[in-house]
Amino acid sequence: MTTLLQDLRFAIRQLRKSPGFTIIAVLTLALAIGANAVAFGMLNALILRPLNMPRAQSLYGIEHGSDYGYQSYPDYLDLRDRNRSFDSLAAFTVTQAGLGIGKDPSRVFGYETSGNYFDTLGIQPYLGRFFSASDERGVAGRIVQLNKHPFTIVGVAPPEFHGTLLLFSPDFFVPLINREQLDGENNLNARGVRWIFEVIGHLKPGVTPAQAVADLNFVGSYLAENYPKEDGLKSFTLARPGLYGDSFRRPARAFLTGLMLLAGLILLAACANLGSLFAARAADRSREVALRLALGSSRMRILRQLLTESVLLSLAGGAVGLMGSIVLLRRLSVWQPIPGFPFYVPVTPDAKVYLVALALALVSGFLSGIVPVRQVLRANPYEIVKSGSSARFGRRMTVRDVLLVLQIAVCAVLVTSSIVAVRGLVRSLHSNFGFEPRNAMLADTDLKMAGYSLDRAPAMQRRMIEAVETIPGVAQVGSANSTPLGAIQVQSPVFKDETRDMRQANAAATAFMYDISPLYFEAAGTSLLAGRTFSWRDDKNAPRVAVVNREFASRVLGSITDGVGRYFKLPDGTHIQVVGLVEDGKYMSLTEEPQAAMFFPMLQSPSSQTFLVVRPKGELGRDPQQLAAAIRSKLRDLDAELPAETETWTSALVAVMFPSRLATVSLGILGLMGAMLSITGIFGMAAYSVSKRLRELGIRIALGATRREVLQAALGRPFRLLAIGSAAGLALGILASRVLAFIVYQATPRDPLVLAGVVLAMSLLGLLATWLPAQRALSVDPAILLRDE
């Protein structure tokens, strides 16, 4: 302990004597360790850490077939009652409702849950009580109104409980048995009607996930045998609850893992930077080291003292970086990137984040401090004292050269990834979605929030369309029960016309379903390729018809060119005639493969959910706020108690664009950090090279060397290292950027602009980093320099 304290005191004195070096080292490590702490904090909160609730380690979600959890309520009841692996199984789904009555109702989001939801999770109420299985017979009272139906508040959930979905914090919980009041649908007894809800439960003690899957598959076989027409549950998997479905969890895990790896590269670059600085510092202190060796100090003692300096710096940098990461993570926890939606990012740091930051600080200090080991072990004190310097510049590659190449390569990887992300985001903003969101307005409402029954909805929707059409400057108005890339999507299996066995296994495709009004395609900017669109004559008394996209025609009708006029079937056996063909589009996510889609007349498939698509022209198209105010005014005139939200269609895509924007911003920040580290690394190498060769440069100038020859002698080596590192980093960046395809739509590293951008960026970084050393080399006065020597 005595020698350790001596090393600490000496290290502090040495660092105080070099404040510039100390500040640069601490800030470099603070950036790198802070970036890693933030990346790990997000990975830990969203992927690694279980939900904040009792017995979280044994809590699993049940998934099957579809990524989006489509199933029927009777199937859930069979799973709940027939399995032998779970203590109990609870079900829940996300819903929205209009809260209160009057002229200014508000929209709230919540959970519809099975009666045993809170009992299954083991959550205790903060106030009052929770509903339970016994409440599934219904409750009475008039405390608040949801969609104009009275609901009794029986309890308040604890403040730390935000449901069983990450990234979503519900405002309320209601029993699933009230689904008809909230959603206008009474399909709890219909086994053939599937909708999105999640099933979760705790495994019984001693039951493994593999045993539970086998048990669930046995129940699935029972359902397939007893309900062949409605069958769809044959194989199951278990997953940790939190992220909604594997279609979201896979890209989220890939992105966060990639982000962690890139943050690790930042730390590696920082260690290389500091290692180079420590090597240069050891060279500058060579006379001090030589004198200590000549006076009898052991080499191990000197190395230990250098390592003490390094670890002390890394702990200081780690502390600063950790404090910054804590502030950023707490800001992220209250971030609301999607207006009007209760977005919740539970990334508040825990003990794991602190331990990781400490471990990274210690490892960084050790890696940076061992770089000068070879210099110290091979130092000859007599030669150093005699020559006055240990710096040598030859043709062979030194440790500092290798570290600089590594650092530049890491920077090039980060710059490549960030440029790829930016290019992908720009392309996604200007790509073809199968509709044109620019210069279009959406008015979103749900008629059931104002008490409209399903039978009354189509008439009201037509009145809404006709009212908005009267606004001066409006070109087209259409209506749909949901819009592509929106939060609400419905899918259904479809069958070829000749199919007789309507089991899901015989389905030709699973298609997205939309109920639309006449002129919807015109308002949405969707191209009609063949046939016709709908008219108000396509009502319940007319034959069932549909418009399909190219992918649907190819997979179900067997032909794209002559698909119009052919028929297909729905799961209930209904024959549908195809009367039109439209272009393919994006429906659930930007990165999805081509999907089948079908559109039905809203009068033949009524829905209370309503999205008005309004396409303006002229001056009105350049003033979205004026158009939104006019739309709200028209809707209030029709029904003052109908909650409606208006926004541009581009703004409505913020949720689906959120992963791309987040990836672009994150990688842009990492690329900027990598560039900063690269600049300091190249600058340090160039400045050190110039300072140690001033006498040589002075002789060259005295002998008549040109400015170009002086620069080549002084900075040729740093530029060669820059070229080598940039080429290696560009190749690695092209390979590493493939993971971005999961998140950023149309992100590709093989874009010529990406390659040109990386080359240009690295060249600018090199010029910026070597500008001052170049000026110093060119300003050498050989007369003054040689006279001083």
Image: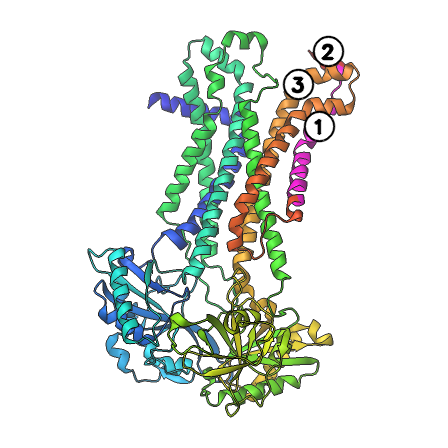
Question: Which residue is the site of mark 1?
Answer: 774
Between 316 and 754, the one lying in front of the other is 754
The amino acid at mark 3 is Arg
Three-letter residue code for mark 2:
Arg
Q: Nearer the viewer's eye, disc 2 or disc 1?
A: 1
Find out whether residue 774 is within the magenta segment: yes
Query: Which span is picked out in magenta?
Result: 756-782
Relative to 351, 561 lies left or right: right
Q: Is residue 556 left or right of residue 466?
A: left
Q: Main secondary structure of the magenta part?
A: helix
> If you read the primary sequence from the N terminus, does the residue marked by circle 2 or circle 3 appear first?
3
**Of pointers 1 and 3, the one earlier in the residue sequence:** 3
Distance of label 2 from label 1 (alpha carbons): 22 Å
Q: Position of residue 465 (x, y in %)?
A: 60, 85
Q: Residue furthest bottom?
A: 541
Please give the label number shown on residue 693: 3
Label 3 CA crowd tier, 10 Å (few <14, some 14–19, many 20+):
some
Is 341 contained in the magenta span?
Answer: no
Task: Identify which residue is drawn at 27% across, 64% down.
Answer: 216
Disc marking residue 787? 2
